[in-house]
Amino acid sequence: MDLPELGAFLRSRRDRITPGEVGIVPGPRRRVPGLRRDEVALLAGASVEYYTELEQGSKVQPSPQMLGALARALRLTGDERDHLYRLAGRPVPTRATDHHVDPAMLALLDRLDDTPALIVSDLAETLAANHLARALLGERQGLPWPRSSQVYRWFTDPQQRAAHPAEDHARLAESLVADLRMAAARRAPDDERLADLVARCTEASEDFARLWEERAVRLRRVDAKVFVHPTIGAIDLLCHNLYTADGSQHLLWFTARDSEVSRERLELLKVVGAEEMSAR
């Protein structure tokens, strides 16, 4: 573990990233070409104070989840990500099961700045998201396991289901479990994270246990969902999915369905998202 070097490494990576690379519009009075500390903290789902302590090389030791979030926020390469973990004294995740975002997916996400978009793992964990996705869905990055998985949150947290109309709950639950069954077929039979997720969800929810035993499989390419936003109300959206070759990650983005109200509310979301970003 070398926390002072960890702080220096974070500073060096922050300095090389321009705001435009991560979807931030630079203001006219910007003093630095790279990212500011508060911007990295926002992208990684951390407080500014916590991230500042990391850069200063204090005794704060980041968790593996936070290191993964920092690697995504700073657009680290695979080698840089591994170096970050070693400096923090944490085991380097294996490439087969880690959360390092596919570079091609990340490049596409960076270009989707006018519609909500995010990158999701096959265990339904949000790996990266633009500001409109955070405005629509809330902050989903950097959550501890297993809450980081949308599957776990759906079957254990009623607040997650409240974001959609009650009449859609059964269909959305079936889709989540069918997706997870597809992931199970791709992963190794002894995959620990998958086994842990299934065990926790089975114990917490009879609905999950029943759906898991039904063994339905379905890869969602286009879906329709109604999101109940706390500020602007219900938004009827189409959900588009683009998968990596191995299916381990997918880019998810949203467009308004054939409804003038939904199109107007999606435009309003852009205003709400911009105001939230300014407030932070």
Image: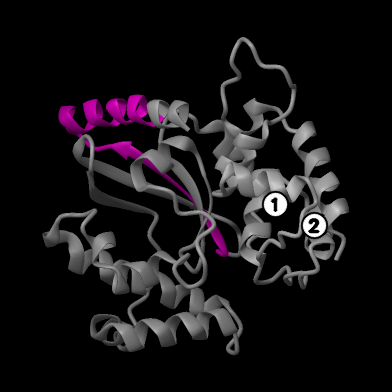
| Residue 90: image location, x then y, percent | 76, 70
Q: Are marks 1 and 2 in contact (CB under 8 Å)?
A: yes
Amino acid under disc 1: Ala
Query: In this rendering, is residue 265 above or below 227?
Result: above
**Chosen colour scheme:** one colour
Rendered residue at 40%/69% (across/down): 179
Instruction: Name the residue nearer the viewer: 176 or 155.
Output: 155
Q: Which type of secondary structure does the marked residue at label 2 adopt?
A: helix
Q: Is residue 90 shown in magenta?
A: no
Q: Is residue 218 visible?
A: no
Q: Would you identify the image quadrant in which residue 88 lies?
A: bottom right
Amino acid under disc 2: Leu
* Left or right of 139 in this view: 19: right
| Residue 253: image location, x then y, percent | 42, 43
Report which residue position mark 1 lands on: 71
Q: Is residue 251 shown in magenta?
A: yes
Q: Would you identify the image quadrant in which residue 267 lies?
A: top left
Instruction: Name the residue nearer the viewer: 255 or 268.
Output: 268
Rendered residue at 67%/36% (across/down): 37
Tell me the magenta residue range. 247-273
Q: Which mark is residue 130?
A: none
Report which residue position mark 2 lands on: 84
Query: In this rendering, is residue 116 above or below 278?
Result: below
Rendered residue at 82%/53% (across/down): 6
